[in-house]
């Protein structure tokens, strides 16, 4: 784990603990994701303003305050303030991801990413979600991504676990087995 990932985890845990005291973890998560989406949707030059360490902290904090003060709770504003003051704005996306992981764990939910060459129809996606829920004993949020280079098959990622049943992977395995048998 990198130092920045460890720092993001500490910030996320602290914010999560604050929310756990009054039962506001879900609301804080929604607000964090809204802030992340707002900053992520900015023009790259405006996003660079938030992340640029050369700017005066007071100027940056003034702009951040104007943008979010009446829109998010005190804990989220406090986090943004600490990030600006300590010049750790680049950690925000990692903090949001870590916080979402903590929230998922609290409510018994897991995020699964499905990579396919073509979109899954609704029935197949529901069947896949149900199968993953049976295996993990958790509620599953299924994210589907399309990659035509897979040719066919499916790749499922749940945290660090990856099940790769794609045709591209099968062909690569066959190629490796063939070349190693020739050696």
Image (cartoon, rainbow, N blue to C red):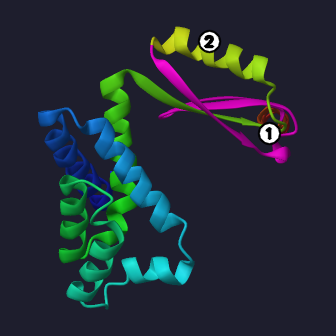
Q: Name, please, the residue furthest toward the top.
A: 134
Does residue 7 sit above or below 50 in this rendering? above
The residue depicted at 30 percent of the width and 56 percent of the height is 72
Provide residue 91's location: percent of width, then percent of height. Answer: 33, 63
Residue occupying the point 18% across, 56% down: 74
From the viewer's perspective, is 138 left or right of 143? left
Q: Main secondary structure of the magenta part?
A: strand
Residue placed most toward the observer, 179 or 120 = 120
Mark number for residue 172? 1
Q: Position of residue 90 (x, y in %)?
A: 36, 69
The residue positioned 20% from the left and 50% from the top of the image is 10
Tag 2's secondary structure? helix
- Distance in Å between CA atoms under marks 1 and 2: 27 Å
Of residue 10 and residue 81, the one placed in the foreground of this image is 81
In magenta, the rendered stretch is 138-167
Is 17 displayed left or right of 35 in the figure? left
Quadrant location of the C terminus in the rendered image: top right
**Residue at (40, 59) in percent of width and height:** 35
Count the marks: how many?
A: 2
- Residue 131 disc label: 2
Compare residues 126 and 150 and report the one nearer the observer. 126
Query: Residue extending furthest left?
Result: 21
x, y percentage for residue 137? 45, 11
Circle nearer the N terminus (1, 2)? 2
Secondary structure of residue under mark 1: helix
- Image quadrant where residue 49 sits: bottom left
- Residue 52 picture location, percent across and down: 37, 84
- Dot in front, 1 or 2: 2
């Amino acid at each position: 784990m990198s130092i920045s990932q460890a720092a993001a985890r500490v910030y996320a845990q602290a914010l999560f603990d604050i929310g756990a005291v009054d039962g506001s973890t879900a609301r804080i998560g929604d607000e964090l994701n809204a802030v992340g989406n707002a900053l992520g949707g900015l023009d790259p030059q405006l996003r660079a303003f938030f992340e640029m360490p050369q700017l005066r902290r007071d100027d940056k904090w003034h702009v951040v305050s104007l943008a979010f003060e009446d829109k998010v709770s005190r804990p989220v504003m406090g986090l943004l303030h600490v990030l600006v003051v300590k010049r750790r704005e680049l950690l925000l996306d990692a903090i949001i991801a870590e916080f979402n992981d903590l929230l998922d764990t609290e409510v018994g939910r897991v995020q699964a990413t499905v990579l396919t060459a073509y979109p899954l129809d609704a029935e197949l996606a529901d069947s896949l979600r149900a199968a993953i829920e049976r295996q993990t004993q958790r509620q599953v949020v299924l994210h589907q991504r399309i990659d035509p280079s897979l040719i066919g098959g499916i790749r499922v990622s749940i945290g660090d676990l990856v099940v790769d049943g794609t045709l591209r992977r099968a062909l690569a395995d066959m190629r490796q087995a063939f070349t190693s048998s020739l050696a």
